[in-house]
Image (cartoon, grey):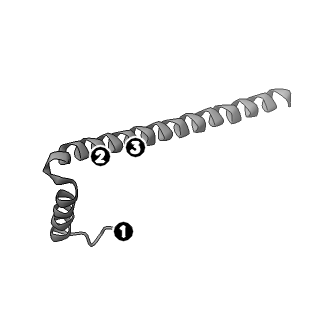
Amino acid sequence: MFKSLGVPEIILILVIILIFFGVGKLPQVGESVGKAIRSFKKAQSQEEEEETTTTKSSAKKSTNSKKTATKKA
């Protein structure tokens, strides 16, 4: 998506942001963006952790059911 985004394009985006928000609001905007990114990464890692836990518990259940079926036979 952003493979062709080079240095000139990034500089242009930063200048537009600077003009739009002004120098006074820029630290607040940066802080808000940083918090949003951290929150997103935290939610993503929690989701991956839940998937791993779910996969492990499913594997344990299938192993236990196989053992039970073997004992009954």
Tally of numbered tags: 3
Residue with the mark numbered 3: 40
Label 1 residue SS? loop
Q: Which tag, 2 or 3, sits closer to the chain's start?
A: 2
Q: Is there a contact, CB below 8 Å, between mark 1 and mark 3?
A: no
Whole-percent x, y for residue 59 in the image: 63, 36
> On the image, which quarter does residue 55 sit in?
top right
Q: Quadrant of residue 2?
A: bottom left
Residue 53 image position (x, y, % from top left): 55, 33
Residue 63 relative to residue 48: left or right: right
Q: Residue furthest right?
A: 73
Q: Which residue is mark 2?
A: 33
Task: Give the left or right position of residue 20, taking residue 54 as reference.
Answer: left
Q: Secondary structure at mark 3?
A: helix
Residue in the picture at 35% in, 43% down: 36
Report crowding for label 2: few under 14, some 14 to 19, many 20 or more residues within 10 A (C-alpha).
few
Mark 2 vs mark 1: which is more N-terminal?
1
Residue 15's tag is none
Q: Amino acid at mark 2?
A: Val
Within-10-Å neighbours for mark 3: few <14, some 14–19, many 20+: few
Q: Nearer the viewer, residue 63 or 9?
A: 9
Bin the neighbour count of mark 1 within 10 Å (Cα to Cα): few under 14, some 14-19, many 20 and up. few
The residue under label 1 is which amino acid type? Met
Residue found at x 15% / y 70%: 8
Q: Residue at x 71, y 29 (%)?
A: 64
Q: Secondary structure at mark 2?
A: helix
Q: Which residue occupies the foreground of this view, 14 or 70?
A: 14
Q: Nearer the viewer, mark 2 or mark 3?
A: 2
Amino acid tagged 3: Phe
- First-in-chain label (1 vs 3): 1
Where does residue 29 sit, x and y in percent of width and height? 25, 46
Q: Point out residue 11 in the picture as x, y percentages from the top left corner.
A: 15, 65
